[in-house]
Image: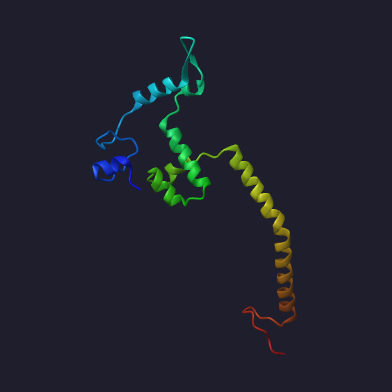
Amino acid sequence: MLTRWERRLGRVIPHVFVRDTGERIRDFYHAWHAACRRAAVAPRDGCAVVVHPELLDRPIPHDFRRTAVRNLVRAGVPRSIARLLTGHKTESVFERYNITSEQDLADGVEKLAAYLAAKPAEDAHRRAARGTLRDNWLSGTVTRQGTSRVS
């Protein structure tokens, strides 16, 4: 889907932050921090009152990149596609952005518990099959290759 800028300029713009000309904005440090300060305060009775103190810590653009990686992984997007979308060249750098949370750990424990709860029935079936094979082996009706011996 072409954006308004791409249609106007008649070319694909591969960058997120661009000027009106489609040229990539390379450094937006000062503009970013000024926007965070403006968003953190609101005018009340002629004074500027801090209404969003978390913005004064100035979230950095990499926080959004981290969020994007987490959302892509949790949405089930294949890692190779997620890496291309976020611009990570290596798996190791991608993993640095894929932060594990307490909720991720809790979800992992729940999945393991569900797997282990279903496992006893599966293991019992395997043990029964192994027991039958061992009994047949000991009685001489099955060879190593699994073929029956003729008596």
Residue ID at (50%, 16%): 50
Residue 39: x and y in percent read 44, 22
User: Which quadrant is home to the C terminus?
Assistant: bottom right
Number of numbered labels in the structure image: 0
* Residue nearest the observer in this picture, 44 or 62: 44
In the figure, residue 104 lies in which quadrant? top right
Most distant residue in the bottom direction: 151
Residue 106: x and y in percent read 64, 42
In the figure, residue 130 lies in which quadrant? bottom right
35 w.r.t. 135: above or below: above
Residue 34: x and y in percent read 38, 21
Residue ID at (69%, 89%): 150
Residue 18: x and y in percent read 30, 35
* Residue nearest the observer in this picture, 140 or 107: 107
Residue ID at (35%, 26%): 29
Residue ID at (71%, 71%): 129
144 w.r.t. 53: above or below: below
In the displayed structure, does residue 115 sit left or right of residue 41? right
Most distant residue in the top direction: 46
